[in-house]
Image (cartoon, grey):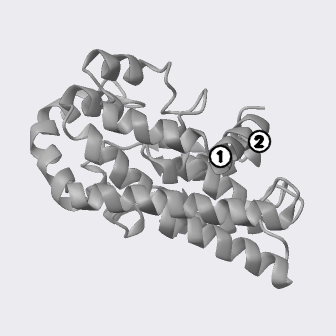
Amino acid sequence: MITLYHLAISHYSEKVRWALDIKLVPHAREALIPGLHRLQMRRVAGERTAPALVDTATDTRLGESSAILQWLDENYPVPLLYPPDGEARTDVVNKAAYCDENVGGAVAGYSYAHLIDFPKALKARWTTGLSARQRPVLSLMFPIVRPFLRRGFELTPENTARRGNEIHDACDQIERWLMASGTGYLAGGDFTAADLTAASLLGPLLRPEGSPWAATGHAAVIAAAAGFPPPSYVEFRDELMRRTAAQWALGIWRRHRRA
C-alpha cells in the first residue's frame, strides 16, 4: 500500500501528486497540517518537509520530491519521466534539479512574503485539503505557527526582492532551454520530469485552473475578501504572466495535468 503524506497547497507535493496521477499509481493520500507537518514528517520519513511517500509492500520511505519521482519511474515506468540512461537522462535530472533549487524556494518565499500580512488569506490557503478534524487544530495553532513562518522563510523586504529576481532568472533559463530544444519541452521531444518540475513549482504564481492555487478556488475567494493579493504582488504576477516561460508552463498544465 502506497501512502502520500502531503500538503495540499505545497508545490513540491503537487509535483509528486502529478507524477502519481499521470502514472495511474493506486495510492492513499494523507493531508498534513501546515506548520505542524514537520513533526509527522520526522516520524514518517525522517525528513522535515513534505511530501513523503511510504510503500509498506517494499518498506520504502522517501521524503524528497525528486527522489520520489525517480522511485516511481523505476517501479511504475509508464509513462517514463526520465530517459532510461545516458546523456538524455542526465540532462533531465540536471534540469529538474535546477528548478528544484532555483524555482521552488523562490516561489514559496515570494508568495509567503505577501501572504504573511493577510492572516485570513494565509489561513484559508492552509485550510485547503484539511479534514473537519484537522481544521480546528490549525485554528488553534495558527497564531503560534505564523510567526515561525516569517522566521523560517526569512521574510524580509530584501529577501522578497531577491526572490523575485531569482524567479525571473529561472524563467530566463527555462526560455533558453525551450529555444535550444525547439520542441516545446525542456529536454528532448517528450514530456519529462524536467517539464513537470518546472510547471508544478511555478504553480502558486501562475494559479492554473484546477490547481490548489486557482483564482476561482474557495481559498482565493476568501483571500480576495481579505484584500489579498496586494498591488505589488499583482504587478509582479502580471509581469511574470507576460513571459514565454509562464505561458509555456500553463500550456504544460493544460496538456499534461488537466487533460
- The x, y position of residue 171, in whole percent, is 59, 58
- Amino acid at circle 2: His
Residue 18 got which mark? 1
Q: Label 2 neighbourhood size at 10 Å, few (<14), some (14-19), many (20+)?
A: some
CB contact under 8 Å: marks 2 and 1 = yes
Residue 256 got which mark? 2
- Amino acid at circle 1: Trp
* Residue at x 27%, y 47% (from the top left corner): 113
Q: Is residue 14 left or right of residue 245?
A: left
Q: Is residue 140 left or right of residue 42?
A: left
Against 163, residue 97 (above or below) is: below
SS class, disc 1: helix
SS class, disc 2: helix
- Say which of marks 2 and 1 sits in front: 2
Residue closer to the observer: 76 or 122: 122
- The x, y position of residue 42, in whole percent, is 32, 65
Residue closer to the observer: 57 or 204: 204
Compare marks 2 and 1 and give the one earlier in the sequence.
Answer: 1
Residue closer to the observer: 117 or 247: 247
Question: Is residue 155 something one can see in this rendering?
Answer: no
* Residue at x 72%, y 32% (from the top left corner): 258
